[in-house]
Amino acid sequence: MSKTLSPLFRKNFVSWLAGTVRIAHPIYDEQLQYFYESPPLVNVRGVKHKLEKAVTMLADLENVGQIDDKHAAIAALCEDGMKCLQKRVAALEKELEETLHELMEARLDIFKKQSKAAANVISVTREKLAETEARCREVFNENHIAHDRLLAELGRPPSAPSMWEL
């Protein structure tokens, strides 16, 4: 980096910092307000990268002795921006943690409901199976009795008990 910086570079740097990063002098209050109120899905990584780049550029300026009051003000804005970004990241992390917790609770509720529904289905199936088995035994016994009656009418001995065992 050269020892002297052109006024055009300084002007472009200030514009880039104020416009792109949205951390600015009170003149850009509207943009700053937008940054604070923007939805949580703001491109945090992009903002962080640009702030880090700005801090690095300012450090380079300081190393070559080109820091003046304007650059010091920009550096302060960068620091404010980083603090704001850290708060935003912390808020996003907290929101993510809460969302994950809610999601886990919802999944647990769904699992409980599904388990309860499955238990109900199993219970109803067992009841129906028991009813069907009882009805089958009744029909089986009726058939056994009818068979023995038919054999008696024909003059034959009743069937062997082992023939009717289930």
Image (spheres, grey):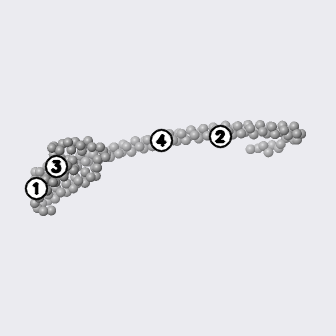
**Direction bottom: furthest residue:** 2
Q: Earlier in the sequence, mark 4 or mark 1?
A: 1
Q: Position of residue 95 (x, y in %)?
A: 33, 43
Structural crowding at the residue carrying mark 1, measured as other residues with C-alpha within 10 Å and reported as few (<14), some (14–19) or many (≥20): few
Whether residue 42 sits left or right of residue 132 in the image: it is: left
In this view, 54 is above or below 164:
below
- Residues tagged 4 and 1 counted as in contact (Cβ below 8 A): no
Whether residue 12 sits left or right of residue 141 in the image: it is: left
Structural crowding at the residue carrying mark 4, measured as other residues with C-alpha within 10 Å and reported as few (<14), some (14–19) or many (≥20): few
**Direction right: furthest residue:** 155
Q: Earlier in the sequence, mark 4 or mark 2?
A: 4
Q: Which residue is denoted by mark 2 in the rendering?
A: 129
What whole-number distance in Å separates the C-alpha atoms at marks 4 and 1? 63 Å
Measuring 10% from the left and 55% from the top, which residue is drawn there?
7
* Mark in the foreground, 1 or 2: 1
Corner quadrant of residue 87:
top left
Q: Which residue is denoted by mark 3 in the rendering?
A: 76
Disc 2 marks a residue whose amino acid type is Leu
Q: Position of residue 81 (x, y in %)?
A: 21, 48
Mark linked to residue 110: 4
Q: Which residue is denoted by mark 1 in the rendering?
A: 7
- Residues tagged 4 and 2 counted as in contact (Cβ below 8 A): no
